Amino acid sequence: MSMKKIQMVDLISQYQDIKDEIRTEFDRVLDSAMFINGPVVKEFQNDLESYLGVTNVIPCANGTDALQIAMMAYDFPKGAEVLVPSFTYVATVEVIALLGFKPVFVEVNPDSFNIDIDDLNSKITKQSVAIVPVHLYGQCADMESLLEVAKKHDLVVLEDTAQAIGADYTFSDGTKVKAGTMGHIGATSFFPSKNLGCYGDGGAIMTNDDELASKMRMIVNHGQSKRYYHDSIGVNSRLDSLQAAVLKVKLKRLDDYNASRRLVADKYDEVFADTRAIIPPFRSPFSTHVFHQYTVKLADGIDRNAMNEYLADHGIPSMIYYPVPNHLQKAYRYYGYQEGDFPLTEDLCTRVISFPIHTEMDDEQQQTIIDGVLRFLKI
Ligand SMILES: *Cc1c(COP(=O)(O)O)cnc(C)c1O
């Protein structure tokens, strides 16, 4: 049998394994015709609350909405400053600007790829209202230090945990908690390729604050307090029943899925650590890594474009997350940032590359990827 085509994410093979269960759950939804707010949405919500150890999960339409709704739950004044790493997916920044707040970019730690605490401290002003740490590629930011900073300056912490669902964070006193449950609110995405992905769009907000939760439950539903009575301006953001059905089935497997991603990462690490050309991902002492992406740094002198093209010619996909930092994106030039403002972030954007990682990767496929990379490096 010939080898399966190598993909960044193999959702087709994953589906084959859970097909019967998914179909049974789909049938329940189809037979009931309760496509919106069916019982399965509440079932998934309860399951996710238990899994995360959080008192409130509010399902919504996608991860970008989740971030936006979290920010709407506070009455921040227009122009208020929200601190956010420049090195993240645009959605994190977009919602800040969209709501009329000012994104204040922060440098990242070049090893962990996550928000740098010293730089964060230096960017806080009287206008600062919130920090949005992003647990990039699947590993938590330095939350213990970040929460101390937030407490000292009375800032809200909204975690973007779209890439890190299921990661565990351990505080210095030994307390262990899930990514997304450390700040005031966590926001996540169930986009199909995320570690917990549905078969369309989906997202969720999580919080241990019951008051914030009831406010956000209103916001997701047009600011409605009771039917046709609207207390605040809201949005329409729902997770539909079919998507909840998929997520209910996949949540049971999330820890196994994350474990198989970690095995793939471990094998890559072992090989790449011996090369001088590739710097494998940093492993945090306080957070597990769920490897939403397996992203390495290339040493000086390694031509990233040439590597990407060489691999593609040999049937091996690779991706650049992200080629342009947000402070240099055309849409955000308005805020007055320039090249050179975030040298570490800008440098990372020129040297990171992500190799395929997913739950169904077999040894033969991974060996093909490794061989391709080593051949390109002439090792
Ligand atoms: C995927 C992602 C989002 C947005 O999620 P959508 O469901 O696509 O809206 C936000 N932040 C990060 C870091 C992401 O990776």
Image (tube, helix red, strand yellow):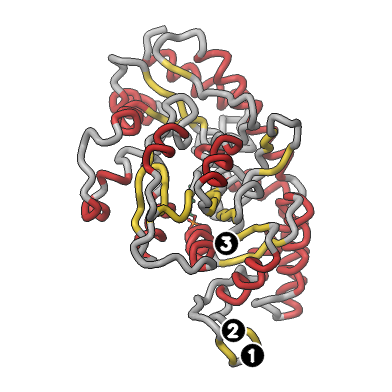
Q: Give SS at disc 2.
A: strand
Q: Secondary structure at mark 1?
A: loop
In-front residue for pair 375/45: 45
**Rendered image quadrant of residue 50:** bottom right
How far apart marks 2 and 3 lie (CA) works out to 21 Å
374 vs 327: above or below: above
**Which amino acid is tagged 3?**
Gly
Quadrant in the picture for residue 312: top left
Asked whether, in this view, residue 361 is left or right of residue 318, the answer is right
In terms of depth relative to the viewer, which is nearer, 260 or 351?
351
Q: Indicate the amino acid at tag 2.
A: Gln
Q: Do callouts 2 and 1 mark residues in contact (Cβ within 8 Å)?
A: yes
- With respect to residue 23, does 158 lie above or below? above
Counting from the top left corner in percent of width and height, residue 199 is at 59, 59
Image quarter of the C terminus:
top left
Q: Which residue is mark 1?
A: 227
Q: Which mark is residue 224?
A: 2
Q: Report the amino acid beneath label 1.
A: Arg
- In the rendered view, would you say 231 is above or below 309? below
**Labels 3 and 1: the sequence-earlier one:** 3
| Mark 3, residue position | 202
Specify whether residue 136 is in view. Answer: yes
- In the figure, residue 353 lies in which quadrant? top left
Give the side of residue 315 with respect to residue 270, left or right.
left
Name the residue located 55 percent from the left edge and 49 percent from the top edge.
159
Query: Which of label 2 and label 3 is nearer to you?
Result: 2
